[in-house]
Structures are given as C-alpha cells and as structure tokens.
Amino acid sequence: MWRWSPELLRELGRACALALAEGGALVALAARNEAKLADVAKEIEAKRRPGGHVPHDVSNEDEVKAAVKAVLERFGKVEILVNNAGVTKDTLLLRMKRADWDSVLQTNLGGAFFCTQSVIGSMLKAALGQSH
C-alpha cells in the first residue's frame, strides 16, 4: 500500500528546492530540522546559487510570521511558495488520540494557511501572486 511518509515529503521538498534553484530562483528553505535544512542549503550553494534557510515550525503561527519576515528582509520578496510540510499519525480512527488529530490538522492545514497568509500580502503587492 502506498502512503505519504515524512521521508517522502522531505525528499519532495528537497527536489522542489533544487529544481527551483536550478531554474534560477533564490530559494529560502524552511522546516523544523535545522541540520537537514543546512544540508539542502549546501546542495543549492554547491550549484552556485544563493539561498538561505529559516528553521521554524509551520504549525506555530508566530514562528511562521517571524520566518517570513526574515525571508522578506533577506530577499525582498516571495514569488513562489511551496507548502510541503506534513505529518502523519497513522492509526485506526478508533485508537487515534485527540492530540494526534490536532497535530495533523495544525501542521497539514494550519501550516499551509499560516504560510500562505503570511506571504500573500507581499505577493499581491508585487502583482506576483496572480495567474498568468
């Protein structure tokens, strides 16, 4: 049976970041694991592309706001947002704890909401958030 896993999500995020960097984008990486962020940042820098990383937890609205502020201060704008964070707490619904359910929703849905809400103003201001 195929299913999402944290490893698959990390690899998907890494692949997106490297592809965007190879395409000429300045890439700001974000995740909770600072060591893994630094590894991907080194891969991007090895391709002679500037970038950076901002460790934070997307399920925490204040951390997201601070991270986006740091990215905007460093790069001046956000043109592309890849919402790739996700967690799983695989178990039968009958056995799932409320805290696990809340964690999944807060990270998978709340994280995408917090990140998008935090960058959309600057994207719209620069007319970059529109479909072309």
Image (tube, rainbow, N blue to C red):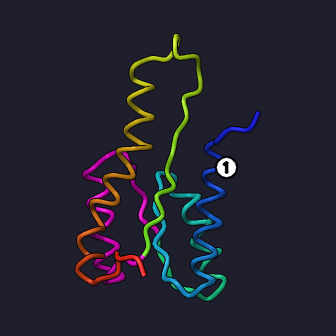
Quarter that holds the C terminus: bottom left
Secondary structure under badge 1? Answer: helix
Q: Position of residue 64 (x, y in %)?
A: 32, 56
Under mark 1, the amino acid is: Leu
In the picture provided, is 49 more to the left or to the right than 1?
left
Q: Is residue 67 above or below residue 32?
A: below
Q: Identify the residue shown where x is 74% and y is 38%.
A: 2
Q: Residues within 10 Å of mark 1 (few under 14, many from 20)?
A: few
Q: Position of residue 44 (x, y in %)?
A: 61, 78
Q: Is residue 111 depicted above or below 131 in this figure?
A: above
Magenta run includes residue 70: yes
Question: How far across and down, in percent of the image, does residue 21 sit?
Answer: 58, 80
Q: Residue at x 27, y 59 (%)?
A: 117
Residue of label 1: 8
The segment highlighted magenta reads: 53-79
The quadrant of the rendering that contains the N terminus is top right
